[in-house]
Image (cartoon, grey):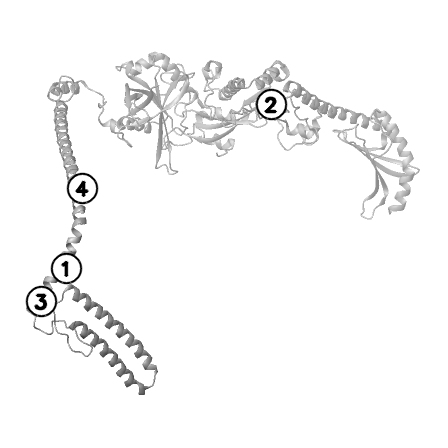
Amino acid sequence: MNDISPEVALHRISPELRPLLCSVVRNGRVGLDSTNCLRVTDLKTGCISLTPGPCCDRFKLHIPYAGETLKWDIIFNAQFPELPPDFIFGEDAEFLPEPSELPHLVQWDAGNPECLLQLVKELIQQYHHYQCQRLRESSRLLFEYDSLLEDPNYGRNMEIYAGRKNSWTGEFSARFLLKLPVDFSNIPVYLLKDTALDPGEDVALLSVSFEDAEATQVFPKLYLSPSIEHALGGSSALHIPAFPSGGCLIDYVPQVCQLLNNKVQYIIQGYHKRREYIAAFLSHFGMGVVEYDAVGFTKLTLLLMWKDFCFLVHVDLPLYFPRDQPTLTFQSVYHFTNSGQLYSQVQKSYPYSPRWDGNEMAKRAKAYFKSFIPQFQEGAFANGKL
Amino acid sequence: MAEPTVRVSGIVLSSLMFQHGNTDSDAEGLVLGESRVEEQITISDSQADRINIQEIYYVQKHIACNKLNHFYSGAGEVNSVAVQKLLADNKQDSVLGWYRQRRNSDQQLSFRERIVHQSLKASLRNPHLLFLLLTPHRASSAESTHRTEYCAYISRNSVFLSVPLLVNNLGLQEPQSYWKLPVGRPSERYSATIRRHSSSFFSSDGLLRDVNDVNAMNDSLQEELQAACREVEDSERQLETLQSEVSALRKRSRERRKKSEAAGRTGEEEEDQRRNLRLQEAVGALFKRSPLFLTQTLTLQGFPVPERTFSGEEEEEEEEEEAVCEEDEAECEEEEAEAVCEEETQENTHSRKRRREMAASSERKRRKSES
């Protein structure tokens, strides 16, 4: 199979069909997993070899669905570009959608560039119904599906792939892909924008694979969009619980959803808390503030003086503030270490409580500075050099 | 259940491929022909009577559409009017199915083809409608060689099954295909000519005349064979009887010979003895006087003993004397052996003693004989 970039595919396709293909490769995001566009491979022509190019009019379309990739052949005819396309559904030879359920096929408009993409979406919807029908081979899995379908939070955003029955072992497997109804809109923007990849839509997908029809081997996995994963602290920050033995999806999915929600709320609250903290320090230390992170509110630097002794205090607020205590770094403006750096001391243990509000934290920090500075000054004089 | 097979002549198939080869897009149309159901009875070692029903579709002609989607819509609904127009003068009953040629695609039914097929089945009211799918694609990168895969499909309970598509006179031919009636596209002139001359070849029951003659010849041959078999059987029986008689005779002669052999063995010995006496008489008659051929009895001094006629008693006495002489000789030999060990001076004495003793014994004999 040869991967073709969208530009190459558009270059080789017959000119009359180019607009249709353009909307598919540029804007073609279908299904729950819409992080990537639809892919096109195996561009071929139905014309004779003497026909001058570009004249490709048939190709394979790769569609992500329920953790699988469907490979459908789409067949046009370059000499008759006004005709609707034909489809070969790969390994799903038994899949036969009802034409009346495909309005964009019945009312095919070759002049509408979105027509092919819409038709593909309708076919995927029909494919979803087809896969749900195949779940009837297992009463256990059908129960899982029906119970999820009743819940509007999950029933409308679910993709199911019923695997082939293993003729050797008789085992029947299925995979459920659910879009979790978690609101990521309140996540601070600064947490989302620093990703190298095009974030696309922020989604959290839960994939649950049933390796057997009796649900004795169940493997869940959580997929997050790159920006969300970054905002939550990376792939290791969030661990979902294992699927309980004898459990069912209608209990497990809300549990995972709640866990993710809590995490997101914690991140959002942490942001607000940090902003409150910085605001309180600004209020208490006024002109002593050298600089602070005005976007993420993760850093603050103060220049203070005690008995003619000037020093800097760098405050670093962690991601899970206020649960995690901010780090204070005291730095002398006079003394250097042997390596040429300003003499500094890091303090992670000082009077602190996550239940204090920002104002209280600022007051307590101020008191701590007063108590710690004499000790720091002695250390600077003793260990540093001017 | 009937096993369907599709047969097409090389001419029809190649014309299909040729037409698509010159079309700058996919092609489709209808295929016409006739279908036949044949019953084949096979006899094997495991089963005496196995009936095999075959449904054979003979593709004889195709009608190509000028453009795609000619007789159906984008959703796959068949337009019956368009189909009838396409058929023109051809009868709807002769429609076997439809075909499609798709360049550079998989040999697999597409979504619309399945929809159209079901719709066409309903429109033509033909539940055994066929679908021929030809998928040519280039076989070499230089596009000098192209390969066309072809297959026929039939729909049974909404499931599409592939049906063998056999090309006449292509590949291994089973013998039955050579003596089936040829299925061509019969024209009226052809049919009329055949009818005019058929009476010369066919009898009233529709079989070739020669077939009856050959059958009659076969019957005669069978009769002759049976007669020959009977003769062979008779001769074999006679032979068996004769052989049994011969073996009985041989057995009797063996027994007789055994008996005669047992009785005749002693007669042979006497005969041998008689023969020896006769020989002796003959030799005696011829060489009676020749001292070379006469046996003589010599005395100890080496003088021959005069001849006498012997009676039985005299023979006994002679035998006794001979035995005594033998005993004396044995004693003398023993004494000689002793004498060899003694001194030579005594040899003569011993020898004289031996001679004296021997002379005494011979004297005794002589006296006995005189008495």
Above or below B149: residue B243: below
- Foreground disc of the pair 2, 1: 1
* Marks 4/2 same chain: no
Give the residue at mark 2: A215
Picture disc at residue B273 = 1
Residue A142 point in image, percent of width and height:
57, 17
Q: What residue type is labelled 1?
A: Gln
Q: Which amino acid does label 4 sit on?
A: Lys
Subunit that carries the residue with mark 1: B
Give the residue at mark 4: B251
Mark nearer the N terminus (3 vs 1): 1
| Quadrant (top left, top right, bottom left, bottom right) of the C terminus of chain B | bottom left
Subunit that carries the residue with mark 3: B
* Marks 3/1 same chain: yes
Task: Identify the residue at image location x=87%, y=31%.
Answer: A351
Picture disc at residue A297 = none
Residue A48 in view of the camera: yes
The quarter holding residue A331 reads top right
- Foreground disc of the pair 1, 4: 1
Q: What residue type is labelled 3?
A: Val
Residue A14 point in image, percent of width and height:
43, 28
Picture disc at residue B283 = 3
- Label 4 CA crowd tier, 10 Å (few <14, some 14–19, many 20+): few
Quick one: B33 or B161, which is closer to the camera? B161
